[in-house]
């Protein structure tokens, strides 16, 4: 998928190991293009989800597109996010890995907004929501 920037504020989440590419537009305009779909001009407040396997792109109206770019302001935002997604984000942000000892913990979801850049503080905040202990191991990827 190609993205043409037309003067804007937006966020792209595209990792090789993930099934989809996410593009959220705050202001301005961007044009999305792929071999599998026609060109589409994203409008402010819209989010595009491109499935890499199928080549399908779905455009959704998002109530809070700013949450996708919160990381640029050192803010982490999770809205009903499963623990696996929380762990992926923390691993990428802090260069750590996690060892889940009780798979039941993976069923937990989290709704948290934190502007702390201190990993210990973030882990304590997440651990308060459920009866579990979360520890990261630095550089143990």
Image (cartoon, grey):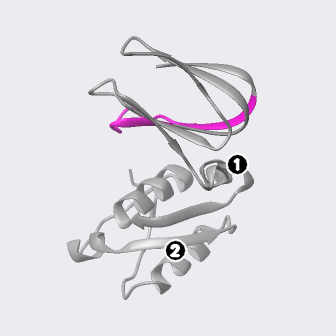
Q: As displayed, is residue 132 above or below residue 139? A: below
- Residue at 67% over, 60% down: 75
Q: Is residue 136 magenta?
A: no
Write the residue at 29% across / 75% down: 105
Residue 139 visible in the shown view? no
Where, by quadrant of the figure, is residue 35 drawn? Answer: top left
Element at badge 1?
Answer: helix
**Badge 1 density bin: few <14, some 14–19, many ≥20, Cα 10 Å:** few
Q: Is residue 46 left or right of residue 9?
A: left
Numbered tag placed on residue 72 in the rendering:
1
Q: What range of the chain is rendered magenta?
A: 8-22
Residue 133 position within the rendered picture, expressed as x and y whole percent measured from the top left: 39, 82
Tell which of 105 and 51 is nearer to you.
Answer: 51
Kindly tell me whether residue 14 is visible in this rendering. yes
Q: Which residue is mark 2?
A: 123
Q: What secondary structure is the stretch in magenta mostly built from?
A: strand
Identity of the residue furthest to the top in this view: 35
Find out whether residue 15 is within the magenta segment.
Answer: yes
Above or below 105: residue 44: above
> Does residue 112 lie above or below 128 as drawn?
above
Q: Position of residue 37 (x, y in %)?
A: 41, 17
> Disc 1 or disc 2, which is closer to the eye?
1
- Label whose residue precedes the other's in the sequence (1 or 2): 1
- Kind of element beneath mark 2: helix
């Amino acid at each position: 998928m190609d993205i043409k920037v037309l003067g804007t504020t937006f966020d792209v989440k595209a990792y090789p190991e993930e099934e989809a590419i996410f593009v959220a537009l705050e202001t301005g305009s961007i044009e999305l293009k792929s071999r599998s779909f026609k060109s589409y001009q994203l409008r402010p407040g819209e989010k595009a989800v491109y499935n890499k396997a199928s080549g399908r792109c779905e455009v959704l109206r998002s109530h809070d597109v700013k949450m996708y770019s919160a990381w640029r302001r050192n803010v982490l935002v999770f809205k009903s996010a499963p623990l696996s997604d929380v762990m992926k984000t923390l691993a990428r942000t802090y260069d750590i890995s996690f060892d889940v000892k009780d798979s039941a913990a993976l069923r937990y979801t989290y709704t948290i907004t934190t502007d702390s850049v201190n990993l210990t503080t973030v882990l304590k905040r997440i651990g308060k929501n459920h009866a579990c202990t979360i520890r990261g191991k630095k550089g143990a990827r």
